[in-house]
Image (cartoon, rainbow, N blue to C red):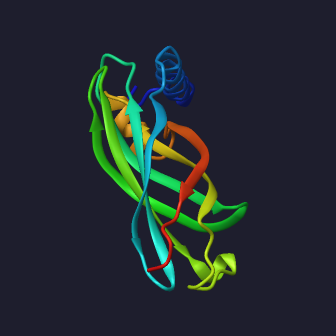
């Protein structure tokens, strides 16, 4: 017999996938909180905000953070969508701060340079994909079979400086 029967191969592959998914089910996901929002730059056409996120890893193994996908609304109006490589590792039982930027064009809000709001309400929502440790987890991630992610949503207010 030169090759194993197809049924054995299918059963083995299905068993490995189930084992990997069940093995990961007992692990807790990282958490994300908002540490700070800062106005980083402003012009007559737009402003730039920096959202400092604090990520906590409850696991005893490091996690490789892959990519943030996020959107920002100001006073209920969608103004920015971003995608940013995380390029970071979250150490075992560790905490790390990462910053994601957003640019707010005044035209999207109907603002003029002379008449922009002093205090605005923002809503930041998004996800971050991460890779669990281990060769099988890495293979499943790279092939797109399993890409774990966590969601975040933060609301608040930020004060804009008066126009110079």
Please, is residue 139 above or below residue 158 in the view? above
What is the x, y in percent for residue 77?
Answer: 71, 66
The residue depicted at 53 percent of the width and 46 percent of the height is 127
Where residue 24 appears, as percent x and y from the top left, is: 47, 21
The residue positioned 53% from the left and 19% from the top of the image is 25
Specify whether 91 is left or right of 109: left
Q: Quadrant of the N terminus?
A: top left
Side of 54 where 148 appears, left or right:
right
Q: Quadrant of the C terminus?
A: bottom left
Q: Residue at x 50, y 36 (%)?
A: 148
* Residue 143 location (% of width, % of height): 44, 46
From the viewer's side, name the closer residue of 31 and 118.
118
Up/down of 152 relative to 21, above or below: below
Q: Residue 4's image quarter?
A: top left
Eyeballing the image, is 142 above or below 22? below
Q: Quadrant of residue 62?
A: top left
Between 75 and 65, the one nearer to me in the picture: 75
> Which quadrant of the view contains residue 18?
top right
In the image, 86: left or right of 13? left
């Amino acid at each position: 017999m030169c090759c194993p029967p197809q049924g054995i191969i299918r059963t083995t592959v299905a068993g490995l996938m189930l084992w990997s998914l069940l093995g990961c089910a007992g692990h807790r996901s990282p958490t994300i909180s908002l540490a700070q929002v800062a106005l980083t730059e402003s012009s007559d056409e737009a402003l730039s905000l920096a959202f400092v996120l604090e990520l906590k890893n409850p696991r005893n193994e490091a996690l490789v953070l892959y990519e943030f996908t996020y959107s920002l609304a100001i006073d209920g109006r969608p103004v920015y969508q971003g995608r940013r490589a995380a390029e970071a590792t979250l150490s075992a039982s560790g905490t790390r701060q990462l910053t994601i930027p957003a640019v707010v064009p005044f035209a999207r809000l109907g603002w003029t340079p002379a008449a922009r709001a002093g205090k605005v309400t923002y809503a930041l929502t998004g996800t971050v994909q991460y890779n669990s440790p281990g060769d099988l987890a890495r293979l499943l991630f790279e092939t797109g079979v399993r890409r774990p992610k966590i969601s975040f949503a933060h609301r608040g207010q930020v004060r804009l400086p008066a126009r110079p």
